[in-house]
């Protein structure tokens, strides 16, 4: 019976040895996969840092572009107001010229003075140097 017990013990030890070898191989695979996983995580961290840096640069570039666009919009609004003012003045001058032409009066150096009931509209003050330059040019063109 002792002999039978020893045989059972040897069989159990062989089975244990077989399972220990399989377990050791599996642990080797896990260690190798763990190293690959660590490399993958470190690469992911580097990519994340690069993306965060890129987002910061993109954000600062967008802020700069927004400020520049705001300045250009303000300048365009001022020019729009100037152009509207000049357009109104041009329309008034065109109306005055139309009135002179309809009255049959010649326009130029030999023109007769306008009738007493014809009162030209007073010219509003100019807003900017550009308007002053344009008005000088219009006067010279007469």
Image: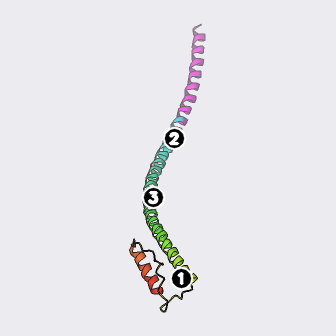
What kind of secondary structure does the magenta stretch mostly adopt? helix
For label 3, count other residues whose C-alpha is less than 10 Å away and answer few (under 14), some (14-19) or many (20+).
Answer: few
Q: Which mark is residue 58?
A: none
**Mark closer to the observer (1, 3):** 1
Callout 1: SS: helix
Callout 3: SS: helix
Q: Which residues are magenta?
A: 1-29
Q: Residue at x 53, y 82 (%)?
A: 100
Q: Which mark is residue 100?
A: 1
Q: Residue at x 42, y 59 (%)?
A: 67
Q: Residue at x 56, y 24 (%)?
A: 17
Residue that protrudes farthest toward the front in the picture? 116
For label 2, count other residues whose C-alpha is less than 10 Å away and answer few (under 14), some (14-19) or many (20+).
Answer: few
Q: Is residue 82 magenta?
A: no
**Mark closer to the observer (1, 2):** 1
Q: For mark 3, what is the residue?
A: 66
Q: Nearer the viewer, residue 4 or 54?
A: 54
Looking at the image, tell me whether mark 3 or mark 2 is earlier in sequence order.
Answer: 2
The CA distance from mark 1 to mark 2 is 91 Å
Q: Quadrant of the N terminus?
A: top right
Q: Is residue 21 magenta?
A: yes
Give residue 137's position: percent from left, percent from top: 45, 83
Looking at the image, tell me whether mark 1 or mark 3 is earlier in sequence order.
Answer: 3
Give residue 54's position: percent from left, percent from top: 46, 54
Q: For mark 2, what is the residue?
A: 37
Give residue 24's position: percent from left, percent from top: 53, 31
Give the quarter of the image for residue 102.
Answer: bottom right
Q: Nearer the viewer, residue 65 or 21?
A: 65
Give residue 113's position: percent from left, percent from top: 47, 86
Looking at the image, tell me whether mark 1 or mark 2 is earlier in sequence order.
Answer: 2
Q: Are marks 1 and 2 in contact (CB under 8 Å)?
A: no
């Amino acid at each position: 019976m002792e002999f039978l017990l020893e045989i059972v013990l040897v069989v159990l030890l062989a089975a244990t040895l077989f399972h220990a070898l399989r377990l050791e191989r599996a642990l080797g695979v896990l260690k190798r996969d763990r190293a690959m996983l660590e490399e993958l995580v470190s690469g992911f961290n580097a990519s994340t840092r690069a993306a965060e840096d890129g987002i910061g640069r993109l954000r600062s570039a967008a802020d700069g572009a927004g400020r520049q666009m705001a300045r250009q919009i303000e300048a365009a609004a001022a020019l729009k107001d100037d152009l509207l003012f000049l357009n109104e003045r041009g329309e008034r001058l065109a109306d005055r010229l139309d009135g002179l032409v309809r009255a049959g009066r010649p326009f130029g150096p030999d023109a007769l003075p306008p009738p007493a009931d014809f009162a030209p509209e007073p010219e509003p003050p100019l807003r900017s140097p550009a308007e002053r330059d344009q008005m000088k040019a219009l006067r010279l063109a007469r």
